[in-house]
Image (cartoon, rainbow, N blue to C red):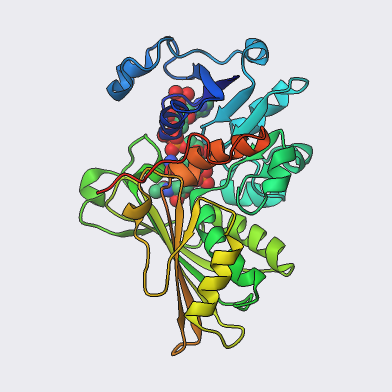
Amino acid sequence: MKNVGIIGGTGYGAIELIRLLQTHEHMQLKKIISHSQHGEQIAAIYPHLTDFIEDPMQELQIESLKDEVDILFFATPAGIAKEIIPQLAGSTIQCIDLSGDLRLGSPSEYEYWYGKKAAPKQLIDKAVYGLSEIYPEQIKQATIISNPGCFPTSALLGLIPALEKKVILESGIVIDGKTGVSGAGRTPTAMTHYSETNENIKPYKIGKHQHIPEIEQYLTAQAKEPITVAFTTHLVPMTRGLICTMYGQLAKETSTEEVIKQYQSFYENHPFVRVREEGSFPTTKDVYASNYCDIGIHVDQRSNRIIIASVIDNLVKGAAGQAIQNVNLMNGWEETHGLHTIPVYP
Ligand SMILES: NC(=O)C1=CN([C@@H]2O[C@H](COP(=O)(O)OP(=O)(O)OC[C@H]3O[C@@H](n4cnc5c(N)ncnc54)[C@H](OP(=O)(O)O)[C@@H]3O)[C@@H](O)[C@H]2O)C=CC1
Ligand SMILES: CC(=O)N[C@@H](CCC(=O)OP(=O)(O)O)C(=O)O
């Protein structure tokens, strides 16, 4: 049994980790670390956790962490993990960072998109990008995982097979993303205020979203030539769920049936990606509170484009679920362990 710590204890990512770890047979939650509410019981903040967690949340103490935990999840905003992970040098703790600190290979790109000083290049290079279905072999060897962003998870899983099978051209890719409000975390803002999100669909961070370079970096790695995308994000009035509807220019003559077969074969041994049959498109509710990514495909002969819809739950496959999937891979456990649940419906 491995001992687990979570930093960023009172955030949504942490709460989702706590929920998923509850049924995991190889991991036990040892420490919830909170910089703002240490000493407090988590159930005092989240009553739904009453009777599940005995110990109060704790302050971060690096030295005692080294003796107490084997696995450490960073459910913290960008800027935190990159400062703490180097202090754990010399320990064997497996670190999984849910933030964007280590996702971009170039420090200057990070500084441009995140507006913060980047992690040392050595640390960036040591971290493995935890897109579980695409990099399983690298993840198995990793000690530091940079967990993908929620939109990149959905977009990359939806686009990579089309690039790999040379179904679409590298140029002209458009990604139209929509997300629920929990994607913005727990701290309320004017953007997430009920009266501003209810009965509203709000484009945000257009042209400056931090996931643009992340998506481009991994599509470029796949295609082995530079790819730029047009990416838009919208806040929609729901709590969980995220959809990327994507458009690519066809590189050759093909059919919906043929491309679906290629996708099904690409994801054949990946239980969390479900590719729909022709004519069926996924909705966010089909993956609610689960680690699935569901993908629907249409080859639009009229416009010479492919249309791909990819849905995930932003807090599960987009964050805590994929983080646990990566820990399963790192430790040689069944990939689906603790995650093989039916989505909550309706
Ligand atoms: N929400 C989502 O759908 C997704 C989130 N992510 C990423 O995961 C990370 C966590 O997200 P989420 O849980 O939603 O965010 P929240 O804002 O809900 O939680 C983050 C938590 O981090 C802690 N924290 C905040 N500021 C600091 C600080 N200066 N130093 C140390 N700890 C701090 C706080 O907990 P405490 O005070 O208890 O320590 C806070 O509650 C973020 O990097 C986010 O970008 C990635 C994919 C999807
Ligand atoms: C609604 C909302 O604001 N969603 C966030 C989700 C990003 C996220 O949480 O991921 P990172 O770790 O990459 O910051 C956003 O679009 O920025």
As drawn, 310 above or below 300: above
Whether residue 186 is visible here, answered yes or no, is: yes
As drawn, 19 above or below 217: above
- 86 or 325: which is nearer to us? 325
Q: Residue at x 28, y 21 (%)?
A: 47
Q: Is residue 47 left or right of residue 315?
A: left
Residue 206: percent from left, percent from top: 45, 61
Q: Residue at x 60, y 39 (%)?
A: 326
- 328 or 235: which is nearer to us? 328
Q: Residue at x 45, y 34 (%)?
A: 13
Q: Is residue 208 left or right of residue 233?
A: right
Q: Is residue 127 left or right of residue 241?
A: right
Residue 221: percent from left, percent from top: 71, 61
Whether residue 127 is visible here, answered yes or no, is: no
Q: Is residue 327 left or right of residue 47?
A: right
The quarter of the rendered structure image containing the N terminus is: top right
- Quadrant of the rendered structure where residue 26 is? top right
Number of callouts: 0
Residue 138: percent from left, percent from top: 73, 45
Residue 196: percent from left, percent from top: 24, 50
